[in-house]
Amino acid sequence: LIAELGKQLSGADSRLSMSAANRKKITSKLQSLDQDITATSGRHQSHLDNIQRLQNEAGEKDNALKQARLSHEQLQGELDQARQKLDKKRRAQTGATQRADVIQELENRLEGVDSGVKELLERSQRDLDPWLGDVVGLVADVIKVNVQHAELVDLALGDYARCLVVDGEDLVGRIVSGDLKPAGRVRLIQLKNAPTLGARLDVELSHEDGVIGRLDRLVQADAEHVQLVRRLLGGTWLVKSLSVAMSLYRKRPGTVRFVTLQGDVVEADGTLVAGPRSASGGIVSRRSELRALHREIHKLTGEIRDDSAAIDEQQEQARQLDGKIQKLLGENTEIAGQLNEQRAQANSQKQQLETAQREHEELTAEAAELDSQIQSLQAAIKTDSTRLSENRHSLSNLAGLLNSAEHRHAELQESLSSLQQRQTTLKVQLAKSQQQHDDSIAAHRELQQQQKECSETIQSTRSSLAQMLWQTRRSRREIGDSTALLSSLESDRQDLDGQLKQLVDQRTRTDQARRELANQLSQNRDKLRDCKDRLHQIELQEGQLSMERNQLAQRLRDDYDIDVAELDASQQEIDEDRDAIDKEISQLRRSIGNIGSVNMDALVELEEMQERYESLDAQYQDLVSSREALEKIIQKINNDSRRLFQETLEAIRINFQKLFRQTFGGGRADLVLEEDVDILEAGIDIVATPPGKPEFNNSLLSGGERALTAVSLLMAIFQFRPSPFCVLDEVDAPFDEANIGRFIDVLKSFLSWTKFVIVTHSKVTMTAATTLYGVTMQESGVSKRVSVRFEDVNEDGEISDEAMQRDSGDEKVA
């Protein structure tokens, strides 16, 4: 026992010296760690201050950027409204200009004016003859009226609106004397002796119910023309309805004319003109509309100029805002980079600080454990020393008592056996305890190593999460920028579509620009799709990391009784940002879920729809331009047809009147168009009055008179459009000998430019011919054609043999 206690005492001394040396090393390490922790804490706090400062600057920049974008969106909305308003005004200007051009063309051609009046007007503008100075102009030239009253004035004037106003007697005298022969009908009105249209000028009806006013008070005229307007329109009153006009007419029959707002006219003699009005307006309406259109075009031109200047100014403001936004975006990007760098450095310093603190805690615990071991070793050494002294003293006593204890040897021998057994049992227990102690120490060290690895894993996970959060914010900024760019490109495409409709002459260049913008739009959409894919991948990684983090937290909670929620204040701040980010991610996920299932072919379908839209839009524009061109061509054809028809009818009418008097030896004939019907759809009445007979219906004429009238009309048409040959098939059948003579006289007047081939049975007609072609039947059933000149016929009426042989145009007929 003394030897064993000596060995234990020697081992305890050696362990005590080793523990003291380890305690000295740990104390030195603790001092070094305290210095590192102090320096790292200072650097970490400096980085936190910089992060707070950069966050404040980033918040200010974000507010400024948000305000700039809000101002840009507001300005863009105002700019779009201004562009739409400008496009509307340009379309209105184009329509008014086209309408004014059409009306001006009609005015230049004096559409609706008689050919004779046209001739005099043109000569008065071109010739310098003194007698043409009497021409003042048309009645419509001296009257100016608002558009809303122009049609009513046209209806009130009727044909008088196309009359020629003259001031003097020279022109009228030349027409009366025959020195001037107009090419067509001419209606003249003396400026100082204008007609009153059958109405009295001294009647006053302003106080009557339903009366709007007197027409001459609704028009304007120069001072020298006021009396003319007074006489033409002074007896015509504008009333609200036809019933009012008829009621007032019954009170004052034969004194006043009335025009209603619906366009009905009640003449002073009781004639009523009612029903739908002609689609083509009168000269007064046309000129009033032309003046109104010119005023509207001038007004629209000024407004378009002002709006264009305002749009240019707004575009300049938008460009300035774009520059400011780009500058703020650059500053925000720079601040975000600095903030991320400071956060990375702060996290690194924080990790170093936490590592140093953990090492400090471990060394402190190890130092405390060594102190405890030193104390326990010192107590054990003291106890063993005391026991060793006691055992040595007991040994001396036992030597003295050995002799007296031999008789107890047997008992002690048995006690020794039991003590040996007990000693063996205690040694076994001691070995087991020592093994358990060593296993516990190894397990504790392994747990510490695992705890260290888990802490490192948690820090790595936190760093990755922060990096992903930064990437998420940057992706959102890229998505926002792409969305803004997409909106801008969409607005540009709409502007280009509007310009495409208005600027047809720049179609090729605009289409090229639109295709380039479409390519940019496709590229931006591809970028947006890539950003969405990256965001989706980040969300998947974030979900996976969140699941791994939850699993690690659960493992730490179960295995090591460590709660991740009980972290320091800085970690709580990150968790707060994490909650906001999780909330925003959940909101975005709900928005994506509300959108529905993703159509992977949406971009392809959009491109196909865009191509189809461009194709259909080009076809639509072509159809619109073709329709406008066709409408202009139809209008031109109708105008030319009306003009040609009117000129042709007037020429045929004059020819018909001359030929009728020639064929009948006098009388009167005329061609009259149907009233209140378009000239291209109107019917033509033939008026024929032979000499010595009263005017009556043409159906009461005899057959010969009707046939002669028809021949006169046909020859009048043929005279207007003659040809080298004319074939007449038995047109003289209804004529008696006197009418045949007149008919032959008419034909002879055409022989200077036309040859006539006449099929006839009349001997009188045959005697007027120069050559006869006949058919003879020398054999039964066989016909033969012969031609005979009058010099080939003898006095007995027989055809000479030479004429028979000269005819080579034999023809047999079965």
Image (cartoon, helix red, strand yellow):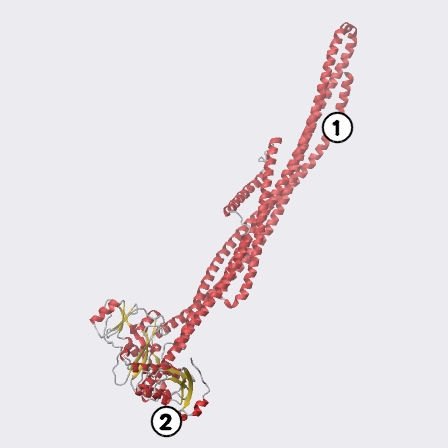
- Of labels 1 and 2, earlier in sequence is 1
Which type of secondary structure does the marked residue at label 2 adopt? loop
Reading the image, the residue beneath label 1 is 18
Picture quadrant where residue 358 is located:
top right
Q: Nearer the viewer, residue 709 or 355?
A: 709
Reading the image, the residue beneath label 2 is 796
**Residue visible at 64% across and 36% down in the picture:** 455
Picture quadrant where residue 417 is located:
top right
Q: CA distance from mark 1 to mark 2?
A: 181 Å
Left or right of 37, for residue 398: right
Quadrant of the image for the N terminus? top right
Q: Examine the rendered structure and indicate whether residue 25 appears above or below residue 64.
A: above
Q: Is residue 190 visible?
A: no
Left or right of 137, for residue 89: right
Query: Which x, y percent locates residue 664?
Result: 30, 86
Which residue, as the protein is rendered here, is positioned at the far front? 780
Query: Which x, y percent locates residue 621?
Result: 48, 64
Q: In the rendered structure, which amino acid carries the disc numbered 1?
A: Met
Q: In the rendered structure, which amino acid carries the disc numbered 2?
A: Asp
Query: Which x, y percent locates residue 634?
Result: 43, 71
Q: Nearer the viewer, residue 682 or 1?
A: 682
Left or right of 130, for residue 609: right
Q: Examine the rendered structure and indicate whether residue 526 appears above or below residue 733.
A: above
Quadrant of the image for the C terminus? bottom left
